[in-house]
Amino acid sequence: MKRTVYNEDHEAFRKTIREFIAREVVPVFPEWEKQGCVPREFHHKFGALGISGFDIPEEYGGAGEVSYRYNAIITEEVFAAGVNFGNWNMSTGIILPYLLDLANEEQRRRWLPGIAAGDQLAIAMTEPGAGSDLAGITTSARREGEYYVLNGAKTFISNSSVATLMIVVCRTSAPSAEDRRTGLTLLVMDTSSEGFQVHRRLEKIGLKTSDTCEISFTEVKIPVENLLGEEGQAFGYLGRNLPRERLGLAVQTCAQAAAAIDFARDYVRHREIFGKSVASFQNTKFVLAECATEQAAAQALVDKAVELEDAGELTPADAAMAKVFCTEMAGRVIDKCLQLHGGYGYVLEYPIARLYADTRISRIVGGTSEVMKTIIAKSMGL
């Protein structure tokens, strides 16, 4: 189905990204998977293209406000090549907006040029005893003169081993009896700070280039001028970027499904059984036709959501619809495409196997499918 969301400028950018991936990523991707993260120097190469500076004002070294279509193109090309950039989109697509929205002028001058050049960001929210229920956060920061002193532990923190700056969600005062969400604060920590420690990298079933670690803070001193926004108001800030995060997951899984279909189509054309190509069997044709139709329907929904994001009109319910539809679709489509590979589909040297493992988290992260349905139902007045 013909897409109308991109113009000639977008397609020229796609060509640049495709060539960059072929040159800088594909040859070294197996090494990235072995080491469990994307090296910092790669992100600075990415920054040299101007991509890390999307939406950062030009006065701070960025590219200025940029259409979300360019983020979508990068995502599509990444998965079409059968690779992964780790947490690149989390840093610039999800965490950076917190700084753009909340940082004061002095903070912008300190932080934004480095991010535009490729410095990575992380955000530390989840704790062993506080996942979706952020009100249960116990990591604390007490004020001592010109510093906050931070203590606590976090888990499932992506980008934590390569980030330069980390936004830490912590408790600066006890919750009130009326509202458990009060007292949470955002502090920006330099990851070279004494007392900050990255512990074991968690071994996940997929996303091998995405470092996800356990971390801790022991009497970490954070300058008061690193307070992001107002003290005690973090809970309200944290919901601001959820629609864009969910749109990103919809774009990602739609791209993963499209890549899976391409990989399966190429495989069945060349694989023979009983003296004939697997592609010649009616079942193969019907399965891939079903997959292509599901992906096209999801793509139409995603493209509309991208247009709404650029227009500043994407609602939480819109983003929830895109996320739940695309992530569930990708799960079905990639499973069918793996089945068409037979036993080879279960071997990690084939990109379909990596897609199968990588995509599963999309129905959990950014809000589970069940949470998305709750948001949609609420928008319907239910």
Image (cartoon, rainbow, N blue to C red):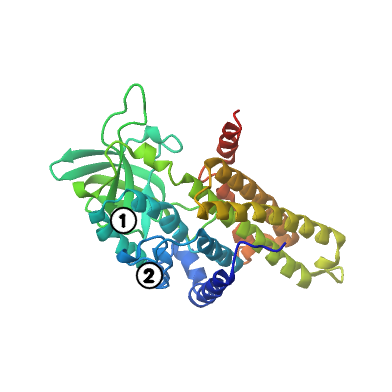
Q: Position of residue 212 (x, y in %)?
A: 43, 53
Residue at 52% across / 53% down in the picture?
311
Q: Is residue 129 above or below residue 178?
A: below
The front one of 289 and 96 is 96
| Quarter location, residue 286 | bottom right
Question: Which quarter of the image is occupied by the C terminus?
Answer: top right
Q: Earlier in the sequence, mark 2 or mark 1?
A: 2
Quarter of the image that includes the N terminus: bottom right
Give x and y (percent) for residue 196.
27, 51
In the rendered image of this protein, does residue 258 appear above or below residue 138? below
Question: How far apart are the alpha carbons under marks 2 and 1?
Answer: 15 Å
Label 1 Cα crowd, 10 Å radius (few <14 / some 14-19 / many 20+): many
Taking the spot 57% from the left edge, 32% from the top edge, the residue there is 378
Coordinates of residue 150 in the picture (x, y in percent) = 24, 43
Residue with the mark numbered 1: 165
Quadrant of the rendered image containing residue 80 = bottom right
Residue farthest to the top?
Answer: 177
Nearer to us in this view, 85 or 35: 85
Residue linked to disc 2: 44
Q: Position of residue 217 (x, y in %)?
A: 27, 46
SS at badge 2? helix
Q: What type is the residue that disc 1 sits on?
A: Leu
The amino acid type found where label 2 is placed reads His
Q: Secondary structure at mark 1?
A: strand
Relative vertical location of residue 335 with respect to residue 39 in this rendering, above or below: above
What residue occupies the far left of the structure in this picture? Answer: 145
Q: Which mark is residue 381?
A: none
241 horizontally vs 333: left or right = left
